[in-house]
Amino acid sequence: MRQKSDQLRSSKLITYLLLIVILFLGLLCLYYGSSFAPGSDPESLRRDGSDPVLGSLPGPQHFDDDSLQNLELPRTIPICDMKYSELIPCLDRELIYQLRLKLNLSLMEHYERHCPPPQRRLNCLIPPPAEFQIPIRWPESRDEVWKANIPHTHLASEKSDQNWMVVKGDKINFPGGGTHFHYGADKYIVSLARMLKFPNDKLHNGGNLRNVLDVGCGVASFGAYLLQHSTIAMSLAPNDVHENQIQFALERGIPSTLGVLGTKRLPYPSRSFDLAHCSRCRIDWLQRDGILLLELDRVLRPGGYFAYSSPEAYAKDPENLRIGNAMHDLLKRMCWRVASKKDQTVIWQKPTSNGCYLKREPGTQPPLCSIEDDADGVWNVQMKACISQYSAQMHREKGTGLVPWPQRLITPPPRLEDIGVSPEEFHEDTRIWKFRVNEYWKQMKSVVRKSYFRNVMDMNANLGGFAAALKDTDVWVMNVAPVTISARLKIIYDRGLIGTVHDWCESFSTYPRTYDLLHAWAVFSELEERGCSTEDLLVEMDRILRPEAFVIIRDKPSIISYIQKSLPALKWDRWVSEVEPSTDALSVSEERVLIARKKLWSD
């Protein structure tokens, strides 16, 4: 009897132990199952920890001649699932959900950058949508794009009364309307110039108003029509409920980028823009002691303008009147003045010196930033609810000292002294890049015309010499200042160009298939020194590139040799050319130039 009882107890014990083991294994599977990167599956995560895209290659590669002989190069790179055709890795809401990030939605933190850790990166080639067509070329693209390339028509119906966009057959047309300018951005721009009494109703004001920041830009029609006024806008909008608005803007060939006024500084230096524009941009400018207006104050130049428009229907709305009065009070304490007001549009202007700041009563809010604050430090830097004072030179001169556009492009700006570059070095840099770009054209002229390109990115822009050399072509350039030399971006803006700070160890904030040409000078060498993955960057560049687009990679021979052998796996072997360029003052070592063209392929 006792033996049976003991057997029964042993049986129950074993059963309980088995149930505990099964429960433990189930929880373990649930945990690891939830940690897969977007779009990846257990097959894509190798047990040896190697990159699923590049086989057994380790992450960072150190390219010397001996190691190159032993590298196992990728034969193929897997294709991502079609549902990731529009993936933006660092702006992926599914990733935010998977990582269980606790973000403050009221502060727009969910629209800020949150990049996947290396083990969660989607290491595969992003496929184009079904029936993708080579984008329509500029200037026709300003007014129409292929619907198949961005198959989203929600905005066309939602904004049908505002002339944002209209679906016509296999194309989407852009009449040039907006929330506050239903009858066309061109007429609206002229009205702003008239409000400011600029000569000949031209918003460029004789070349003195060149750089514009358009926040909450929609499909960027305001920026599109500014271009004919010799003015360039950085059109900015988040990846929000207005689906794919920046993707439409880039497909049209309009300078634009994804971004949000949230908790972190915009990736632009201080004193970069002559005008900030908000046409019913739905931004709460009064939140957190006016921190968002103070961020605009940081990036606006001395005497810069802020044009704020709201619909006529709100003219007598009590809440709209309350907001307007509160903004007026705040901006007055920030030493701004009303430059002009007409109907529901008001234009404020910043002071040209520190004089007003120094005359404020003690304890006036918002306070002045401390002297130690670096107003040009922007990468992953939190916004600050304080006023950035002008430098002693700007205060003394009551302005930036910049000459009008287009002379601004080739004239050494005063802030060169801040980064230790002489006017002579500036001119030499401009001369060298003019020569280098001419050599690039010679290398490519057998396969492409200059008019083929519209959206161009310089991944290591230095002083902006590459973009300056393209001034006589119909392109715009996103000048990227790597985080290691981000101080140089202010020189690019002082030349009348636009750009952003970025860390190439991470994905760029843009949609797939948005650029016609990527120029990478010494980008991979710098990446190698920092221990980041060359393979990740190649896959990221492919994501950014349009089909039939080009890359120009200028780097040391070992890196060029490695990348060239990787071209078939990347499907960048539509056309390839490699040359040894002549040595110049910018050459830090022996260099090679590789130009390759991406194929148009489908999944």
Image (cartoon, rainbow, N blue to C red):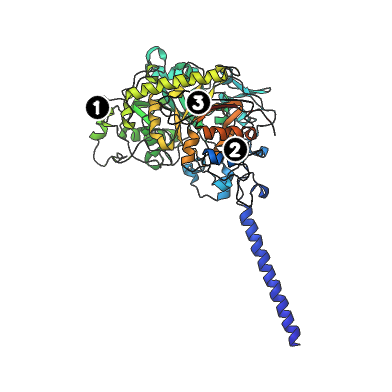
Above/below status of 533 relative to 257 = below
Q: Please, what is the three-letter code of the amino acid marked with disc 2? A: Leu
Which of the pair 322/395 is nearer the observer? 395
Residue 81 picture quarter: top right
Q: Please, what is the three-letter code of the amino acid marked with disc 3? A: Pro
Asked if disc 2 and disc 1 are in contact, CB closer than 8 Å, the reply is no
Residue at numbered disc 3:
255
Label whose residue precedes the other's in the sequence (2 or 1): 2
Asked whether, in this view, residue 560 is left or right of residue 490, the answer is right
Circle 1 Cα neighbour tier, 10 Å, few/some/many (<14 / 14–19 / ≥20): some
What is the CA distance from the residue labelled 3 to the residue labelled 1?
34 Å
Circle 2 Cα neighbour tier, 10 Å, few/some/many (<14 / 14–19 / ≥20): some
Residue under the image location 58 percent in, 39 percent down:
69
What is the CA distance from the residue labelled 2 to the residue labelled 1?
48 Å
Residue at numbered disc 1:
396
Residue at numbered disc 2:
87
Label whose residue precedes the other's in the sequence (3 or 1): 3
Asked whether, in this view, residue 352 is left or right of residue 179, the answer is left
Residue under the image location 58 percent in, 22 percent down:
174
**Is residue 506 visible in the rendered structure shown here?**
yes
